[in-house]
Amino acid sequence: MSRSERLLDLIQILRRHRRPVSGLTLAGELDVSIRTLYRDIATLQGQGAPIEGEPGVGYVLKPGFMLPPLMFTDEEIEAIVLGSRWVAKQPDTRLSAAATDALAKIAAVLPDDLREELDATALLVGPSAEATREGADLGIIRKAIRAERKLEMTYEDASGAGSRRIVWPFALGFFDKVRVMVAWCEMREDYRHFRADRIADLAATDTRYPRRRAVMLKEWRATLETSRKL
């Protein structure tokens, strides 16, 4: 591993920790001596990295720091390109355009050699097995999730029977052939999964639902774990 790669790895390790990490722990993760670790930290601090701390206390990287120019390993580039290409082929047109724009922004700040790797990656996303009908505007759902707002909609079950619902959306699952909104349903007074292709007359509201999205997501995951054990 070159020194530049090691410095980048050190930044990445510090990003994973919100609290101070001891020099010995950092040196162990990088497989270097404690003396080398101290020199690397001093180098990064000299280059402007906001690393706070001292020997015996630990080190922490202040939030928001970016190491220009962006550096990625070959596998990280492949993951970024593959993920962006997959999203770009989804029926959600706004999310698709955002994926294409994000990839272009990343490419614009990469060094020339890494930009060539990004352009030349051979990982491709094939067409879906069959065309999907979204039904609901996924952009409305995503916005409601971000803002923690209730949605009103008509939902058709497998037999085609429709019912009017008010739901608290907190997650959106992207599967190969269908998109699924996860929400608390006021009518059922429980968590429910709603296929986007069965949602009609979807309308956003200005009403904030009374619980935090992260709390409901954690609680919903716990119910899934419980059901698997039964």
Image (cartoon, rainbow, N blue to C red):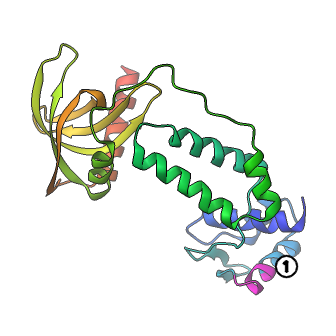
Q: Nearer the viewer, residue 186 or 96?
A: 96
| Above-or-below relation of 25 to 50 | above
Most common secondary structure along the magenta stretch:
helix
To which quarter of the image does residue 227 belong?
Answer: top left
Give percent across and percent down for residue 221. 37, 37
Residue 44 part of the magenta-drawn span:
yes
To which quarter of the image does residue 29 belong?
Answer: bottom right
Q: Quadrant of the C terminus?
A: top left
Give percent across and percent down for residue 76. 70, 50
- The residue at the point 77 percent across, 86 percent down is 46
Q: Nearer the viewer, residue 164 or 63?
A: 164
| Above-or-below relation of 93 to 195 | below
- The residue at the point 62 percent across, 74 percent down is 61
How many other residues sit within 10 Å of disc 1, few (<14), some (14-19) or many (≥20)? few
| Above-or-below relation of 61 to 159 | below
Give percent across and percent down for residue 192. 24, 32
Give percent across and percent down for residue 145. 30, 51
Q: Which residues are magenta?
A: 42-48
Residue 84 part of the magenta-drawn span:
no
Identified by mark 1, the residue type is Arg
- The residue at the point 33 percent across, 32 percent down is 134
Q: Would residue 66 be found to the left or right of residue 166 on screen?
A: right
**Residue position marked by numbered label 1 in the rendering:** 39
Q: Does dot 1 land on a helix, a strand or a loop? A: helix
Q: Nearer the viewer, residue 7 or 59?
A: 7
Q: Nearer the viewer, residue 143 or 96?
A: 96
Extreme residue in the top direction:
159
Q: Would residue 146 be found to the left or right of residue 93 on screen?
A: left
